[in-house]
Image (cartoon, helix red, strand yellow):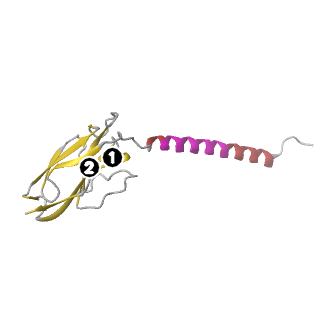
Amino acid sequence: MSFYDPASFRLREFLKMIRMLVAAAGALFASTAVLAADTPSVKGAKVYIIAPKNGDTVSAPVTVQFGLKGMGVAPAGIEMEDTGHHHLIVDKETPPMNDYLPVGDPQVIHFGKGQTETELKLAPGKHTLQLILADKDHKPHAPPVVSEKITITVK
């Protein structure tokens, strides 16, 4: 009678490898969950457009001033508690607040250096503007800090 059974040995090795893969996948999932965790916003924090005002008729180029209450501004990539950087949404629906904001979309203008004002070259006509504060990784805070959408007319 033999104590070595090749089929049994292969099965034990296979099961051992499966356990190692499951453990590695679990560790990877846990680290990804930490990286994707929401950055909390300060209760009552508010982002808003100082100028122009909703309904204003303006000349091009349009100077847009950003306002923020209850939190601070920090450049993208800099981890500082209770801060974020602005994204200006121009003539576009509000993007989903549960995902990273796109970088490089001409209608989602990223202010990663911590800017609080910009000059826009907008064509004559009606335009909508909205601000979103995002964390160091371009993800909206939880809960999101989003301005009201305003409409302006460029003459």
Which type of secondary structure does the marked residue at label 2 adopt?
A: strand
Badge 1 crowding class, 10 Å Cα cut-off, few under 14, some 14 to 19, many 20 or more, is: many
How far from the left and from the top, in percent, is residue 77?
32, 38
The circle on residue 108 is none
Give the CA separation, mark 1 to mark 2: 9 Å
Kind of residue at disc 1: His
Q: Is residue 72 left or right of residue 32?
A: left
Return the residue at label 2. Answer: 87
Q: Is residue 59 above or below residue 136?
A: below
Outermost residue to the front: 44
Please tell me whether the stretch drawn in magenta is mainly helix, strand or loop: helix
Outermost residue to the top: 80
Which residue is at 28% across, 45% downward?
A: 46
How far from the left and from the top, in percent, is residue 58?
8, 58
Which residue is at 15% across, 48% downward?
A: 118
The circle on residue 138 is 1
Residue 68's quadrant in the figure? top left
Q: Is residue 107 magenta?
A: no
Q: Which residues are magenta?
A: 18-33
How far from the left and from the top, in percent, is residue 112?
25, 43
Disc 1 and disc 2 in contact, CB within 8 angstroms: yes
Which type of secondary structure does the marked residue at label 1 adopt?
A: loop
Kind of residue at disc 2: His
Residue placed most toward the observer, 27 or 12: 27
- Quarter of the image that includes the N terminus: top right
- Quarter of the image that includes the C terminus: bottom left
Q: Is residue 28 magenta?
A: yes
Which residue is at 31% across, 42% downward?
A: 45
Q: Is residue 14 left or right of residue 123?
A: right
Badge 2 crowding class, 10 Å Cα cut-off, few under 14, some 14 to 19, many 20 or more, is: many
How far from the left and from the top, in percent, is residue 137?
35, 43
